[in-house]
Image (tube, rainbow, N blue to C red):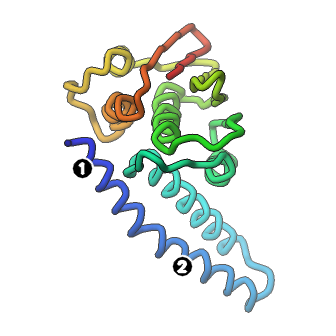
Amino acid sequence: MRHDLATLVGSRICHDLISPIGAIGNGLELLALTDGSPGAEMALIADSVQNANARIRFYRIAYGAAGTEQMLGSADVLSFISVLARGGRFTYFWQVAEDRPRREVRCALLLLQCFEAAMPVGGDIHVSVIDGRWVLSAECLRFNIDPCLWDRLATGDSTFAYSAAQVQFALLPCMLQEAGRALKIKMSSDRIVVSF
């Protein structure tokens, strides 16, 4: 029940924020039309609005409620992941061609955040579905693995006192169970592979 309430709160926050951020973006477009070429300040604001919009769309799927029958297409995911990757530390290779249940996509996005937490200098993250099983791999020069988080993720233990920055580790076991999926983790010095 606790994770149901958390996903409803996530959905509500994202729903309430997406409209004003979209309105700011629309206002910037109108200003650009009336003022001609935008200056560096306007470009910075436009980039920030676009990034905030993409991040809220990410959070809406990763932390929001998902119905049993809801499906999500790759084009939807790529539309915000590509914005988040622009000029950032991470390169995402989303190689999922077909529509997938939103509950499964939610698990994949939470795993992306788990990977990001373990990659302080950034790196490459690959996402694919092979024979119906999700496979996510992360590669970077240096991982910073917190054994307390990753061991509990593997066992599904949610009794640990997580911080706000670690909430993806706390929610993922519940979301995997809801999606009817089990997690497998393989780690080496320069690569993490997780499947579910």
Image-quadrant location for residue 43 = bottom right
| Percent coordinates x, y for residue 92 in the rendering | 66, 36
Residue that extends furthest to the right in the rendered view of this protein: 37
132 shown above or below 35: above
Residue 82, visible in the rendered structure: no
Q: Which mark is residue 5?
A: 1
Residue at the image point whose x is 71% and y is 39% from the top: 97
Relative side of 150 to 104, left or right: left
Which element type, helix, strand or loop, lies under badge 2? helix
| Percent coordinates x, y for residue 35 in the rendering | 74, 89
Name the foreground residue: 61 vs 56: 61
> Distance between the Cα atoms at labels 1 and 2?
28 Å
Residue that extends furthest to the top in the rendered view of this protein: 188
5 shown above or below 175: below
Which element type, helix, strand or loop, lies under badge 1? helix
Of tags 1 and 2, the one toward the viewer is: 1
| Percent coordinates x, y for residue 98 in the rendering | 68, 40
Amino acid marked by disc 1: Leu
Image-quadrant location for residue 90 = top right
Relative side of 141 to 35, left or right: left
The residue where tag 2 is placed is 23
95 shown above or below 132: below
Mark closer to the chain start, 1 or 2: 1
The quarter of the rendered structure image containing the N terminus is top left
